Image (cartoon, rainbow, N blue to C red):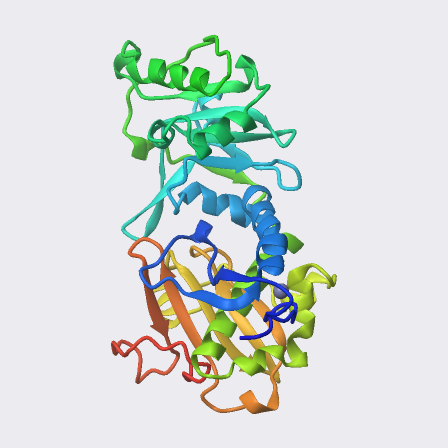
């Protein structure tokens, strides 16, 4: 492509870089689909980078994905600015309710899993950092990541730190002492404070998780990221079917300006239906379940191209990408995919009864007759 699919800048003016259709926060896939040579580095690094960071650290959806730590990161960052999370883990001892609740996907269901962690307050003002002890231990000292982390933690005091580790019977201090050493290596002059322990218990007993602030917390950062994923997916399919020129059609100018943050729109103009917690694909409807994956579908409806997107089995958002250009008005317009972050697979979706269940070749065409 010679022009950036978002801002329209020419390759002769600016460098282009690779854009992941699905941000890495949401997992990596065996056939990772990326837009190569389609997005300029100004849009990619200059605009989408900071947008995705805010999404990850300060929106309901973004923080939820961090809880699954699908990219096996060594740190979780929470800003606590616009989106305040309040979590109760149901422990009698309040200190343990301070732990960051991690989840894993077990037999298709999310399950809370305690992970040894260091919590450090004071990130971005009132936010905090969660360091995953086992992953931090593996970071080579003196290398970029460890040094950057040390730099970020400069000025943090001992009182900002809480450490959560395992130990037998409250007497095995091995893991705790290792973690204390780690905090000191990171430059914080840690002095042990109050120490509490819980009797050994089966992690599956920690089920009393209660959350506040869940319903429909969407703001423009969330919607811009969702719209970007939806447009990226549509663009990938357009390129795959040789229709890349359609991406510069004026019908998409509005959604692109909105994604780039150059145009403000009322949320209801972008998310055109109330987000739903009901499954959107046939398998979910028939079995009355939610699949813990990322679903992205586009189709035409009332003269518009709409994209239905649901990440990690969360709310289904219906996003309007713009009026459908005449050249795309064909009966078989539409396509859909499910991205499974546990098995790292991409699965084709169709609402065509006859094609369902047939293992056909994965198609990204615009005209797959979703
Ligand atoms: Zn651009």
Q: Residue at x 56, y 15 (%)?
A: 157
Q: How many marks?
A: 0
Say whether residue 89 is visible.
Answer: no
What quarter of the picture does the C terminus occupy?
bottom left
Say whether residue 315 is visible.
Answer: yes
Figure check: 79 above or below 56:
above
Q: Residue at x 44, y 41 (%)?
A: 67
Camera-nearest residue between 130 and 293: 130
Q: Residue at x 54, y 88 (%)?
A: 328
Figure check: 329 above or below 15:
below
284 horizontally vs 94: left or right: left
Ligand 1 location (quadrant): bottom right
Image location (x, y in percent) of residue 286: 35, 69
Question: Can you tell which quarter of the image residue 156 is in?
Answer: top right
Image location (x, y in percent) of residue 149: 49, 29
Question: Can you tell which quarter of the image residue 131 is in?
Answer: top left
Figure check: 126 above or below 84:
above
Image location (x, y in percent) of residue 20: 47, 60
Figure check: 262 above or below 190:
below
Image location (x, y in percent) of residue 366: 46, 81
Q: Residue at x 31, y 78 (%)?
A: 356
Question: Can you tell which quarter of the image residue 183 is in?
Answer: top left
In this view, which residue lies farthest toward the front? Answer: 12
367 horizontally vs 250: left or right: left
Camera-nearest residue between 209 and 123: 123
């Amino acid at each position: 492509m010679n022009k950036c699919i978002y801002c329209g800048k020419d390759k002769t003016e600016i460098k282009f870089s690779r854009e992941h259709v699905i941000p890495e926060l949401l997992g990596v896939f065996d056939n990772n689909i990326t837009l190569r040579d389609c997005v300029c580095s100004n849009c990619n690094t200059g605009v989408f980078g900071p947008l995705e960071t805010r999404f990850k650290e300060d929106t309901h959806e973004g923080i939820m994905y961090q809880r699954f730590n699908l990219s096996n990161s060594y740190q979780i960052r929470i800003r606590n600015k616009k989106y305040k999370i309040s979590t109760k883990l149901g422990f009698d001892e309040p200190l343990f309710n301070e732990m960051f609740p991690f989840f894993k996907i077990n037999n298709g269901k999310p399950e809370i899993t305690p992970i040894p962690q260091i919590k450090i307050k004071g990130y971005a003002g009132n936010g905090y950092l969660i360091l995953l002890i086992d992953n931090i231990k593996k970071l080579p000292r003196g290398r970029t990541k460890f040094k950057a982390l040390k730099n970020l933690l400069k000025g943090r005091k001992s009182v900002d730190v809480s450490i959560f580790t395992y130990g037998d019977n409250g007497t095995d201090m091995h893991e705790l002492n290792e973690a204390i050493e780690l905090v000191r290596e990171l430059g914080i002059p840690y002095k042990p404070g109050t120490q509490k322990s819980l009797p050994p218990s089966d992690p599956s007993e920690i089920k009393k998780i209660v959350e506040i602030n869940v319903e429909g917390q969407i703001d423009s950062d969330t919607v811009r990221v969702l719209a970007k994923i939806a447009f990226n997916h549509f663009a990938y399919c357009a390129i795959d079917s040789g229709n890349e020129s359609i991406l510069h059609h004026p019908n998409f100018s509005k959604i692109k300006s909105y994604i780039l943050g150059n145009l403000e729109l009322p949320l209801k103009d972008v998310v055109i239906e109330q987000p739903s917690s009901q499954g959107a694909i046939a398998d979910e409807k028939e079995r009355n379940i939610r699949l813990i994956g990322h679903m992205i579908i586009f189709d035409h409806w009332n003269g518009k191209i709409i994209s239905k997107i649901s990440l990690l089995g969360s709310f289904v958002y219906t996003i309007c990408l713009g009026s459908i250009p005449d050249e795309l008005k064909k009966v078989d317009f539409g396509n859909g995919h499910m991205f499974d972050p546990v098995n790292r697979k991409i699965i084709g979706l169709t609402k065509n009864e006859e094609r369902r269940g047939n293992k056909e070749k994965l198609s990204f065409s615009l005209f797959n007759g979703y």
